[in-house]
Amino acid sequence: MHIEPGVVDGAKMALAAATAAGAAAYTAKEAFGDISRTNVATFAARTALAAVGTFVFFELLPHFPVGVSEVHFILGSTLFLLLGAAPTAIGLALGLLVQGLFFAPTDLPMYFVNVTTLLVPLFGIAALARRVVPQATAYVDLRYGDVLKLSGAFQAGVVGWVAFWVFYGQGVTAASVQSVLTFGGAYMLVVLIEPLADLAVLAAAKSLRDTGLGRIFTPRLYAA
């Protein structure tokens, strides 16, 4: 998910900076809460895993330009379920930054736009998980329907923010509406595949429950 340079520019970039700053502040709040429940070492390890995962998902998994952005298998819900909201948020931001600095420098002017487009849907599914996942259910025991809700909500959030930035930056025209519809339609492939990826990863994580490796994941993965 990389919104094309120029979709938002000039003075309008101020809103992108403001939304990214808000996402950063909320990330900091969540990070302090996470560290208070766990410890700095495991938080740092989960953050590093999220950053590496983000880079791998963006660079190595199939991705293709569609209209005003690119379709990626971001696996944001997967990272959230395994690592928690704050490490995933920092990992997404770091992975996106590394990619921009070393592999796609033309994307750097849109960094705040792209960060907002990823982090706000992430925090949305974190809130949704508190509502749809029973307190007595560990994430490794989630059913397909619950995983579909989380993954679908994340992807819908990404598409929604892409649409917002396009209409905000370019106005509501026949061309901008068509580009958003094309992008949203292409993302249906991701919506179909990512819940299955989530279930596969959760099944693999379940087998690590009683091993040393299991301790690196977010406590909510195994404990209700």
Image (cartoon, grey):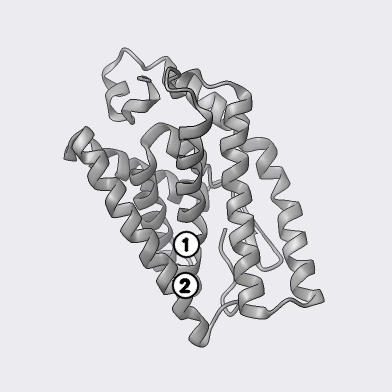
Q: Is residue 93 above or below residue 216?
A: below
> Callout 2: few (<14), some (14-19), or many (20+) C-alpha neighbours within 10 Å?
many
Looking at the rendered structure, the kind of residue marked 1 is Thr
Looking at the rendered structure, the kind of residue marked 2 is Ala
Q: Are marks 2 and 1 in contact (CB under 8 Å)?
A: yes
Q: Measured from the top left, where is residue 12 in percent x and y?
A: 52, 82
Residue tagged 2: 16
Relative depth, front residue between 153 and 118: 153
Q: Measured from the top left, where is residue 199 in percent x and y?
A: 56, 25
**Residue found 69% across the figure and 37% down from its top:** 192
Residue tagged 1: 116
Marks 2 and 1 sit apart, C-alpha to C-alpha, by 7 Å
**Residue found 26% across the figure and 19% down from its top:** 212
**Residue found 50% across the figure and 33% down from its top:** 131
Along the horizontal axis of the image, is 139 left or right of 68? left
Taking the image as drawn, is residue 182 in sight?
A: yes
Q: Measured from the top left, where is residue 115 in percent x and y?
A: 45, 61
Q: Quadrant of residue 65?
A: bottom right
